[in-house]
Amino acid sequence: MGFLKNKSCRQQITDEHRSCQDAGRRAFLKKAVKAAAIGSTAVVAGCQAPGLLGSKEEMALQFQEYFKAHYRLMTEKERDATIIRLERLAKLQKGVDVQISSKGALPGVLYGYGFNVTRCEGYMECVSACVRENNLDRKSNTQYIRIFEMEPGQMAPNAGNGKFFNEVPVDGRFYMGAQCNHCDNAPCIKACPTKATYREPDGIVVVDYDWCIGCRYCMAACPYYGRRFNWNEPVVPANEITRKQHYLGNRQRRRGQMEKCTFCVQRTREGRLPACAEACPTGARIFGNLLDPNSEIRFVLENKKVFRWKEELGTDPKFWYFID
Amino acid sequence: MTQKSSVRQLFGFMTDVARWSLSGGIGYQLFLCLLVVFMMLGVFAYLVQWKLGLTVTHMSDIVSWGFYIANFTFLVGVAAAAVMLILPSYIFKDEHFHHVVIIGEVVAVGALIMSMTFVFVDLGRPLQGWHILPIIGLFNWPSSLLTWDILVLNVYLVLNLSIPAYILYCHYNQREPDPRKYRPFVFISIFWAFGIHLITAFLYEGLPARPFWNNPLMGPRFLASAFAAGPALITVLLAIIHNATTFKIPKQTFNKLRLIIVISAIINLIMLFSEVFKEFYFPTHHSLSAEYLYFGLDGHNSLVPWIWTAVSINIVGTLLLAFNPGKNRPMVLLPACVLLFIGIWIEKGIGLIVPGLVPSPLGEVVSYAPSWVEISIALGVLALGMFVVTILLKPALIIEQRFETNNETV
């Protein structure tokens, strides 16, 4: 990862320093929030048997969650408070200890993605890695990534076959993936009536799940089928939950919320690859910092024959297909 | 007039209106009860949807908008169509329309309430609805067309409630309303009527992701079909009022409405023909949605019978109204209006929304038909709209009638 190597030690030190501070402040706030929750529980419940306290605490936390602001408008303190509430709710509802990060975009980073059409052989390891990493709903079988089996002459995923059950690779066929293109000029962002979906400074198009009202206008606006809606309450078995989470990434979604690929924000902002790129057995998936001239994605853009899907729409995707 | 007496007057107006809306013959009471039953059915279905999520609908990630949004789109048109009565009666001082303009305005209110309810029941997280409100939430205006639509629909609702309320209040007190007080708002409401429907069209027209919608004819065609379907509904409603109440509607009103409907329906058919020509003379990848709608695609042809029914009854209704074989007899006129109304409802509802979303951007083709929950909620919303129209219209007609008879005797 080019951009990782380039990250200066100084930056790393300040990051660690910050996260230490964060941890201290969070630990303090955690106690405060717990106290507040118990306090409001007392108000809500009067003097109830201690056995009921769990669910009452849950109610109190959800009550506080209801009134929180849009993520972008929250102060650091408010962000910490909501994260503590969400972590506590995960513990209460699922019995799972999760760590939710609110790490912001790294300076000087703009993420880009390359998909090697020549290399992909349709194993779909990326799809299952994505499902596991991002805690996608197992009940409705939500998947951010779709792989299409293509006949020669076809050059856009929508022309291919998205429902192939044969052994791969098949001679004479090739494979193309489709997922959120993280457009620089994203139609979904323009459409959203509440600004719940927006572009982070590192170019990732995210959804503030808790701000989304579920109108699905973004879904109609997306030319890449990059968005998924929670028609039912999403189900992820407790032992399969990925615990390292991000507020804008793989944390627990709720019924009625829109969600989408976030380039695995919880991983990539820590300097790791997105789960799909890491899982790919053929190395067909390239990810990196577009602003770093030494990154792999820049090498691909400069030396390979790249193209983008539906270029004519002017959405300016940061997802390139390329041919070896 | 002292402050106190005007307050008392207003209070008397309110209580009389409430009394008149809810009292009536046994038939009237039964009708209201029936509407309440359907509303309860809608509430029950909505509770099911509330409990389980939108998964109880037949919508999916591919057909992400369905029956609710289809009805919303159509009803905005019905609301806008009130302008076809408002414009001639207030601006051209047409006496035959002036006599019934209040009915058009009440229909607009009912249609608006229905269309906004349809958007509300379509929301995945209605409790978070406050996130869209300006100031306390984030109102993505002017970027999002949905915020434009919310804005124009609410202002149109206020206009269509307050103008008739003022005029009725004056008539209730047996005095002529002051045109200086309401005429400016009438002008605004006329422009606004075009605005609500154009902006609703822009909601779809502005999406390059959906070639079936991304079509500059959408706005004008919405207006033409609305100005056919809306007055067709009002014609039927006027006939019902004429027969069921003592409020009589002059023949000339029906004749003039027929002309409006015919002209709009013909323009609508011309535009429909133009769209069909574009899609099928030289079919491109962008014509797949139209192919799906008119002929079916990959074995998915659930919309085919609907759209052909819609097109046929559209044409039959338009021809009947244009050539007028019944010589304005209601026996022919009213069924023609009903045919036209249903035809436009199918074509502009399900026939517009679903093909816009199919094939999906990934080329996938699926079928869609509303689930029992969607149908029940839609019936409930329809009953709500009819209820609103009924209880607003009843006192309005009583006040108008009293005012007219009083003026005649003077």
Image (tube, coloured by chain):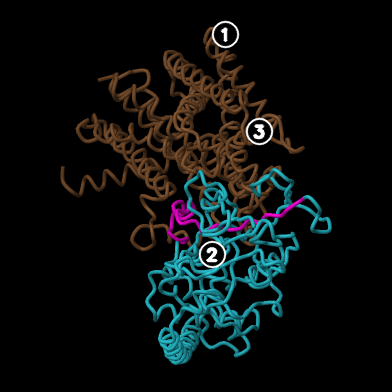
Q: Amino acid at mark 3?
A: Leu
Residue count near mark 3 (Cα–Cα under 10 Å), binned few <14, some 14–19, many ≥20: many
Q: Chain of mark 2?
A: A
Q: Name the residue carrying label 2.
A: A299
Residue count near mark 2 (Cα–Cα under 10 Å), binned few <14, some 14–19, many ≥20: few
Q: Which residues are magenta?
A: A173-198
Q: Which mark is residue B326?
A: 1
In the figure, B271 relative to A273: above or below? Answer: above
Q: In the structure shown, which secondary structural element does the residue marked by tag 3 occupy? A: helix
Report the quarter where the N terminus of chain B lies.
top left
Q: Amino acid at mark 1?
A: Gly
Say if labels 2 and 3 share a chain: no
Let me know if residue B21 appears in the view. no
In the figure, A169 relative to A72: above or below? Answer: above
Q: Give the side of residue B159 with respect to residue A70, left or right.
A: left
Q: CA distance from mark 2 to mark 3?
A: 45 Å
Q: CA distance from mark 1 to mark 2?
A: 77 Å
Determine the residue located farthest toward the front in the rendered image.
A303
Say if labels 1 and 2 share a chain: no
Q: Nearer the viewer, residue A266 or A319?
A: A319
Q: Nearer the viewer, mark 2 or mark 3?
A: 2
- In this structure image, what is the colour of chain A? cyan
